[in-house]
Image (cartoon, grey):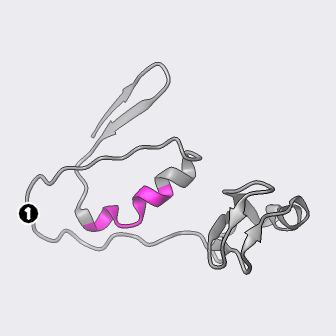
Amino acid sequence: VAIDHHASRVSIEAIIPTRGLIGFETDLVNLTRGEGFMSHLFREYAPFEGEIGGRGRGVMVSMESGLSTAYALNNVQERGRLFIGPQEDIYEGMIVGENARPED
């Protein structure tokens, strides 16, 4: 693993199995609030080295489509970290936040 700190960004280089990247790019974009960027290259085939852990926290999912409202977000923000703000277009089934508790 190599980590380089630049003036306004951090670059991380690591060897990760492809199955470990499934879903990670979405998590990266959400964690960096849209600023994250990921690229990857195939290196080699390698033997199986064990299971990869699953998601540790639950997510908050929109039940309706339309514009998000400050009132609705205020009611759910105490349950976890939101990925959206008021007056954003959302669709039914969209992940809008991550639950604060691992068991939810």
Magenta span dominant secondary structure: helix
How many marks the image carries: the answer is: 1
- Identify which amino acid the numbered label 1 is placed on: Tyr
Q: Secondary structure at mark 1?
A: loop
Horizontal placement of 40 versus 96: left or right?
left
Horizontal placement of 36 versus 17: left or right?
right
Which quadrant of the figure has residue 74? bottom right
Give the residue drawn at x 56%, y 50%. 31
Q: Nearer the viewer, residue 55 or 95?
A: 95
Is the residue marked by circle 1 packed among few (<14), some (14-19), or many (20+) residues within 10 Å? few
Give the residue drawn at x 80%, y 56%. 86
Horizontal placement of 79 versus 23: left or right?
right
Q: Nearer the viewer, residue 91 or 31?
A: 91
Q: Is residue 57 above or below residue 77?
A: below
Residue 37 makes an appearance in the image:
yes
Residue 100 makes an appearance in the image:
no
The quadrant in which the C terminus is found is bottom right
Q: Is residue 22 magenta?
A: yes
The quadrant in which the N terminus is found is top left
Q: Which residues are magenta?
A: 19-27
Q: Nearer the viewer, residue 104 or 6?
A: 6
The picture places residue 67, in percent across and down from the top left corner, at 78, 65
The picture places residue 70, in percent across and down from the top left corner, at 87, 59
Q: Is residue 52 magenta?
A: no
**Outermost residue to the right:** 71
Give the residue drawn at x 34%, y 69%. 52
The picture places residue 72, in percent across and down from the top left corner, at 86, 67
What residue did someone put label 1 on? 45
Which quadrant of the figure has residue 71? bottom right
